[in-house]
């Protein structure tokens, strides 16, 4: 179901109200737009919410849609802060913008890339998706640091996770770029890997910052 951005924000706010206070409703005055906004009619029209005595309540279908919406938002937060290293208020704002692009299928790819995280950067739970349940059932670790590889294993570079620009530049100069194939040839005493026709040696601290898809 494709909803407007405002409608998704209402579902998120209602989910958070229930999650944080245990209340089953949301006071519309806490929203940034008035109660006559078309987004409310959109949600009631889809039978996702109902408004009783001036308060917003989930319908069963709405709770499920709210779970999907908050999952996308918190995955977007993880992507912005963990992978793109955009933090603070700027990270929150960009996550709010990006989450609306995570249509069905895209959120699964991002969740898998992030190795099925269970919490957002603020410690709030991320509702698991089917991909999470399947990965745990299959024992599939998804994306892991290079330090989790054994000698001879090969994978695809997913992303680099570092706040140090010098480290980032060093790894990129080695060809450690998302989408490139990487083979770990030795794991001791240094991590020696091959990208293309070139071979490099790095320490464990740097190897931990290279995330690879098996």
Image (cartoon, rainbow, N blue to C red):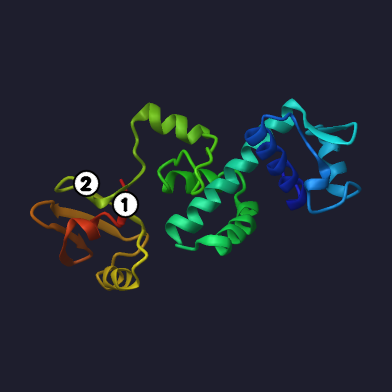
Q: Quadrant of residue 214?
A: top left
Label 2 sits on residue? 149
State if disc 2 and disc 1 touch (CB < 8 Å).
Answer: yes
For image coordinates 24% across by 60% down, the residue present is 206
Q: Secondary structure at mark 1?
A: strand
Badge 1 local density, few (<14 within 10 Å), some, or many (20+)? many
Mark linked to residue 212? 1
Question: Quick check: 99 left or right of 158?
Answer: right
For image coordinates 31% across by 52% down, the residue present is 212
Q: Quadrant of residue 173?
A: bottom left
For image coordinates 55% across by 48% down, the residue present is 106
Question: Quick check: 161 left or right of 123?
Answer: left
Instruction: Locate the N terminus by quadrant.
Output: top right
Residue farthest to the left, as pictured? 189
166 vs 214, nearest the viewer = 166
Percent x, y for residue 145?
Answer: 29, 50
Percent x, y for residue 103?
Answer: 62, 48
């Amino acid at each position: 179901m494709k909803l407007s951005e405002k409608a998704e924000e209402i579902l998120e706010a209602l989910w958070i109200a229930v999650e944080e206070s245990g209340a089953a409703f949301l006071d519309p005055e806490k929203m940034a737009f008035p109660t006559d906004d078309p987004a409310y009619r959109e949600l009631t029209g889809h039978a996702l919410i109902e408004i009783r005595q001036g308060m917003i309540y989930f319908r069963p279908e709405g709770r499920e849609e709210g779970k999907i919406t908050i999952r996308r938002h918190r995955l977007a937060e993880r992507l912005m802060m963990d992978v793109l290293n955009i933090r603070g208020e700027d990270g929150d704002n960009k996550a709010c913008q990006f989450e609306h692009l995570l249509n069905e299928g895209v959120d699964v790819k991002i969740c898998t890339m992030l190795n099925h995280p269970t919490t957002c950067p603020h410690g709030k739970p991320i509702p698991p998706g089917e991909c999470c349940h399947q990965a745990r059932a299959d024992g599939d670790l998804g994306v892991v640091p290079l330090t989790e590889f054994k000698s001879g294993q090969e994978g695809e570079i997913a992303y680099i996770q570092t706040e140090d620009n010098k480290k980032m530049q060093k790894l990129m100069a080695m060809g450690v770029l998302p989408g490139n194939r990487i083979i770990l040839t030795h794991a001791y005493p240094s991590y020696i890997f091959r990208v293309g026709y070139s071979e490099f040696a790095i320490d464990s601290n740097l190897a931990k910052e290279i995330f690879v898809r098996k």
